[in-house]
Image (cartoon, rainbow, N blue to C red):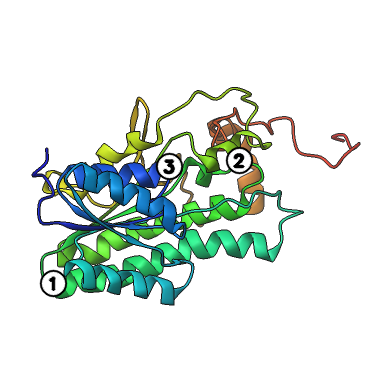
């Protein structure tokens, strides 16, 4: 579908490797002109050359999106190179895994600044340009099932949860300007997934290889007019998977005239709610605390 994104201008952050590389290639294959952003300019240049060899249009950008200044330079670069911006794919990311009791401020801030603030700054500045153009656009964020909870990833899971919430909010706020906002939770074998596989986050010794570029077709689809009815949604993708992530919502709800006392709550918790507790965490492990949570060596009275 070479004509699908003809005359569209796209930015992909972290576009020089892995999943971001796949986004860049598939956007270009669908006809978009792509600004491939990566702090590793050599890797970005490789992707650009691959696009050019296939007859596409692309330029490199090495701006650092972990600061507002870097994001501003990135958006300005896109306007200078291509005259507009229609598509922004917020893909850049980093891991600094440690458990809560060992995590430093530097570990937290590094992940938060790149994932959350980088997504915020880039999207705000891109959306302003899209509004000014009067042509609308598409913003696609990157979240993860890690925001369900994942051992050793306080910073990363918090960041991905924040990005999911920003996606819902921006879809509501920006619709009047013709700007759609969605997100993906991608899967792929990358340097980041290798770090995940070797950590306490998983007990899978031999994770299957998943082509990281396989997330690209969904990015191209969500960037196009084929997705004009889709905003505020998050999709899981990569490999054989295409899944819709349901927005957070309250489950079983009880009401009581005059409100709830402590005794009332204790009276219904075991009977009405505890059996409703579902699988916990990114890996979907069965709820592990049915027997209680106690300090080391302690037992239930």
Which circle, 1 or 2, is nearer the viewer?
2
Tell me if residue 35 comes above or below residue 145 in the rendering: below
Q: CA distance from mark 1 to mark 2?
A: 41 Å
Which x, y percent locates residue 4? Answer: 11, 44
Provide the secondary structure element on which disc 1 rests.
helix
Instruction: Tell me the residue that label 1 is attached to.
Output: 133
Instruction: Tell me the residue that label 2 is attached to.
Output: 195
Q: Is residue 281 left or right of residue 171?
A: right
Tell me if residue 246 comes above or below residue 127 in the rendering: above
Q: Are marks 3 and 1 in contact (CB under 8 Å)?
A: no
> Is residue 76 visible to the viewer in this orientation of the structure?
yes
The part of the image, by quadrant, that contains residue 152 is: top right
The first of marks 3 and 1 along the sequence is 3
Provide the secondary structure element on which disc 2 rests.
helix
**Which quadrant: the N terminus?**
top left
The first of marks 3 and 2 along the sequence is 3
Q: Is residue 211 left or right of residue 190?
A: left
Label 2 Cα crowd, 10 Å radius (few <14 / some 14-19 / many 20+) = few
Q: Are marks 3 and 2 in contact (CB under 8 Å)?
A: no
Q: Nearer the viewer, residue 54 or 28?
A: 54
Which numbered dot is residue 18? 3
Provide the secondary structure element on which disc 3 rests.
helix
The part of the image, by quadrant, that contains residue 185 is: top left
Which x, y percent locates residue 25? Answer: 28, 43
Label 3 Cα crowd, 10 Å radius (few <14 / some 14-19 / many 20+) = some
The first of marks 1 and 2 along the sequence is 1
Which x, y percent locates residue 172? Answer: 26, 61
């Amino acid at each position: 579908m070479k004509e699908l994104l003809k005359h569209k201008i796209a930015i992909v952050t972290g576009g020089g490797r892995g999943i971001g590389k796949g986004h860049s290639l598939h956007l270009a294959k669908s006809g978009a002109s792509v600004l491939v952003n990566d702090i590793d300019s050599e890797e970005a240049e490789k992707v650009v050359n691959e696009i050019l060899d296939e007859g596409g249009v692309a330029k490199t950008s090495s701006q650092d999106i972990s600061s507002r200044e870097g994001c501003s330079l990135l958006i300005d670069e896109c306007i200078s190179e291509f005259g507009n911006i229609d598509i922004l794919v917020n893909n850049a990311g980093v891991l600094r895994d440690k458990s809560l009791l060992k995590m430093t401020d530097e570990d937290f801030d590094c992940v938060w600044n790149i994932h959350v603030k980088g997504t915020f700054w880039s999207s705000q500045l891109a959306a302003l340009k899209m509004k000014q153009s009067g042509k609308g656009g598409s913003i696609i964020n990157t979240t993860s099932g890690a925001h369900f909870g994942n051992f050793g990833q306080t910073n990363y899971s918090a960041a991905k949860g924040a990005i999911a919430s920003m996606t819902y909010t921006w879809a509501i706020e920006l619709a009047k300007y013709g700007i759609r906002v969605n997100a993906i939770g991608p899967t792929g074998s990358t340097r980041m997934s290798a770090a995940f596989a070797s950590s306490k986050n998983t007990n899978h010794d031999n994770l299957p290889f998943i082509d990281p570029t396989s997330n690209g077709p969904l990015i191209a689809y969500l960037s196009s007019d084929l997705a004009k009815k889709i905003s505020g949604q998050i999709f899981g993708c990569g490999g054989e998977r295409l899944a819709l992530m349901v927005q957070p919502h309250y489950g079983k709800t009880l009401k009581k005239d005059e409100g709830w006392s402590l005794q009332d709550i204790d009276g219904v918790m075991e009977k009405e709610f505890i059996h409703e507790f579902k699988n916990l965490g990114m890996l979907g492990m069965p709820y592990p605390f049915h027997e209680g949570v106690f300090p080391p060596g302690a037992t239930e009275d």
